[in-house]
Image (spheres, rainbow, N blue to C red):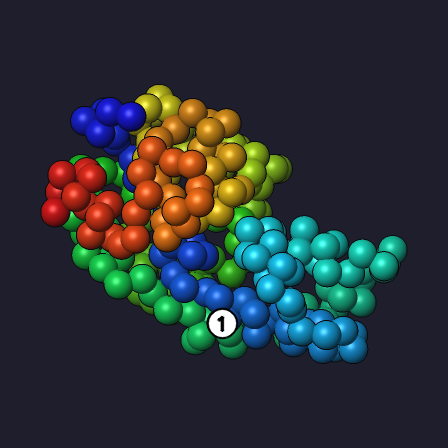
Amino acid sequence: MDIIKIKAVVFDCDGVMFDTAVANRKYYDEVLKCFDKPALNEEQFVNIHMMTVINAIDYLFPEMDDLSTVYDSLKNIGYKKFIKHMSMEKGLKELLIKLKDNGYIRGIATNRTNTMEKVLEDFDLEAYFEVVVTAATVKKPKPDPEQLLLIMERFELKPDEIFFIGDSDYDRQAAASAKVGFAAFRNPKLKADFNVDSMDEIARILLIN
């Protein structure tokens, strides 16, 4: 990976831009409680962390052929009240400002769907990104590379001009399929061009610290 060629830095949301563990666990536990199912166990939690809402519901309710009642409960519960339990990663805004000052395109590629806009609004991040691609934007969410390919197409970028930061195997697979540079965030088990633990480390890699 040639750092000099990078023109766009793209972030996953959950586990990179934000610590969403508490928010996501509370959300899905409330859904499960509506159907008298036990709270998430650790294996379930790790898996749903990577998934879209649709895939997570399919995974958590395999015994149900008709999931319409589950989706009705999702609408009633909503996610907005759980956003307050999300914690923005230290140094994120500072890194985003440095990226802009150094001419980088700033993007998001996330398997969130209709909640990303509200998250950006609540944390005053709307003006910090040039492109936001969610699972609702594409036909195939991560681990498919479509989100990254869409960003490449929109800005006429080559694979070696994108640096993607993610924390899950879905992110790793998407980066590998798109042939873009990949940094694993706080997940040393993931095979990556770089393994990082902070926003400052990303700045150092890009030589903008």
Q: Amino acid at mark 1?
A: Val
The answer to whether residue 31 is visible is: yes
| Image location (x, y in percent) of residue 69 | 80, 67
| Image location (x, y in percent) of residue 25 | 56, 70
Figure label count: 1
| Image location (x, y in percent) of residue 106 | 30, 43
Q: Nearer the viewer, residue 108 or 180?
A: 180
Q: Is residue 161 left or right of residue 154?
A: left
Q: Is residue 140 left or right of residue 199?
A: right
105 versus 158 height, above or below: below
Q: Is residue 177 left or right of residue 166?
A: right
Quarter of the image with the N terminus in it = top left
191 versus 69 height, above or below: above
Residue indicated by mark 1: 22
Q: Secondary structure at mark 1?
A: helix
**Residue under the image location 35 percent in, 22 percent down:** 158
| Image location (x, y in percent) of residue 143 | 56, 38
The answer to whether residue 132 is visible is: no
Tell me which corner region of the image, top left, top right, bottom left or bottom right, holds residue 35: bottom right
Q: Nearer the viewer, residue 52 or 120?
A: 52
**Residue under the image location 25 percent in, 31 percent down:** 7
108 versus 67 height, above or below: above
